[in-house]
C-alpha cells in the first residue's frame, strides 16, 4: 500500500526508547482529538508471538510467515493479537530485545508498514515509532523527533518496570538501551534517524506536560497555515 492521501492529517513522532515519545504521542492525540498509533507495540506483538511459538526472531522467513498469520488490533487503548489481549505481556525485557531483532527484517517491516498506513486512511492520526516521518509517512504534515540522554531514558524505563524479582538493575537497563539504540540506528532498513523536516525536541530536562504543550502549539499553528 502507498502512503495515505495527501489530504489526510498525520503527525509523526519518532525517537529512541525512553525519549518520552509514547507518552507525548498519546497525550497529544488526546488533546487534538486524533487517533493514536503505537507502532512499537506492533513489533512487540510479533516478538511476543515468536517467543510463544518458539520461533527464532533472527529467522526472517519464519517471522514474516508468522506476522502474516497474525491479526493485530488496537481497541480502546488495548492491544489484541488474534483476539487475545497482550497489552501488558508485550512490555517484558525479553520482548523488548526480541522486538528490536524482528524489526530488522524488511519483509516483516513491509507487512507492518501496510497496517500502519491503513490506520491513517479514516481519521487524523498521531503515530509514533522509529520510521514514521522518514519511511511510513514521508509527506506527513507535521513531524517530531524526540530525544533524551541515555541515562534519563534508562531511568524512565526503570521507573515504569514492575517492582518484582524480574526487575533488571538500572545499569543493565542502560546497557540494554545502548545496545538497542545501536541496533535500531545501524540496521540497513529504516534506521532510526530524524527526517530532514522533523522538529527535534530534547525531553531530558522537561516535564511531559511542557513537551506536549509545545508540540500542540506547533501542530495548531501548522493547521492554521493549511487553511
Ligand atoms: O518503541 P518500542 O520500544 O515499543 O519499540 C519496540 C522495538 O520496535 C524497538 O526495538 C524499535 C522497533 N520499532 C521499529 O523498528 N520501528 C517502529 N516504527 C517502531 C518500533
Image: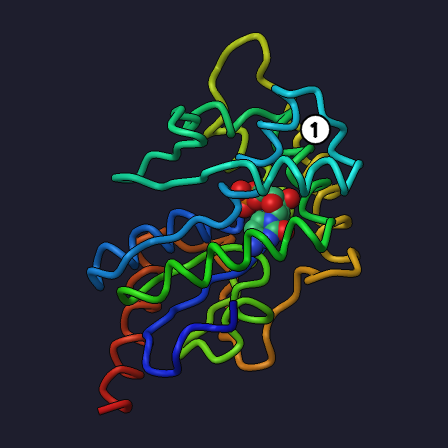
* Circle 1: element type: helix
Q: Quadrant of residue 47?
A: top right
Placement of 192 over or under 91, stated as above or below: below
Please identify the residue farthest to the top as the structure is shown.
165
Observer able to see residue 217: yes
Image coordinates of residue 36 in percent, x first then y, are: 33, 54
Give the residue at x 58% y 42%.
68
Front residue of this view, candidates 35 and 15: 35
Observer able to see residue 152: no
Q: Quadrant of residue 49?
A: top right
Give the residue at x 45% y 31%.
81
Q: Quadrant of residue 172?
A: top right
Front residue of this view, candidates 154 and 12: 12
Image coordinates of residue 186 in percent, x first then y, are: 79, 57
- 107 with respect to 24 (left or right): right
Image coordinates of residue 154 in percent, x first then y, are: 60, 37
**Residue with the mark numbered 1:** 171
- 52 with respect to 182 (left or right): left
Give the residue at x 66% y 39%.
65
Image coordinates of residue 165 in percent, x first then y, are: 57, 8
Quarter of the figure that contains the C terminus: bottom left
Give the residue at x 65% y 23%.
51
Amino acid at each position: 500500500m502507498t502512503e495515505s492521501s495527501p489530504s489526510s492529517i498525520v503527525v509523526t513522532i519518532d525517537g529512541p526508547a525512553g525519549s518520552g515519545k509514547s507518552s507525548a504521542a498519546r497525550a497529544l492525540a488526546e488533546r487534538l482529538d486524533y487517533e493514536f498509533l503505537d507502532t512499537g507495540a506492533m513489533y512487540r506483538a510479533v516478538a511476543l508471538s515468536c517467543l510463544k511459538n518458539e520461533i527464532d526472531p533472527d529467522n526472517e522467513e519464519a517471522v514474516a510467515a508468522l506476522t502474516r498469520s497474525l491479526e493485530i488490533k488496537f481497541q480502546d487503548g488495548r492491544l489484541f493479537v488474534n483476539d487475545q489481549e497482550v497489552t501488558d505481556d508485550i512490555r517484558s525485557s525479553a520482548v523488548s530485545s526480541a522486538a528490536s531483532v524482528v524489526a530488522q527484517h524488511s519483509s516483516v517491516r513491509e507487512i507492518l508498514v501496510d497496517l500502519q498506513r491503513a490506520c491513517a486512511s479514516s481519521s487524523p492520526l498521531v503515530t509514533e515509532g522509529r520510521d514514521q516521518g522518514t519511511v511510513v509517512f514521508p509527506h506527513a504534515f507535521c513531524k517530531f523527533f524526540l530525544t533524551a540522554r541515555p541515562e534519563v531514558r534508562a531511568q524512565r524505563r526503570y521507573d515504569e518496570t514492575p517492582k518484582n524479582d524480574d526487575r533488571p538493575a538500572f545499569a543493565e537497563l542502560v546497557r540494554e538501551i545502548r545496545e538497542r539504540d545501536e541496533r535500531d540506528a545501524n540496521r540497513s532498513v529504516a534506521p532510526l534517524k530524524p527526517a530532514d523536516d522533523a522538529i527535534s525536541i530534547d525531553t531530558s530536562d522537561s516535564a511531559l506536560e511542557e513537551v506536549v504543550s509545545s508540540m500542540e502549539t506547533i501542530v495548531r499553528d501548522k493547521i492554521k497555515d493549511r487553511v
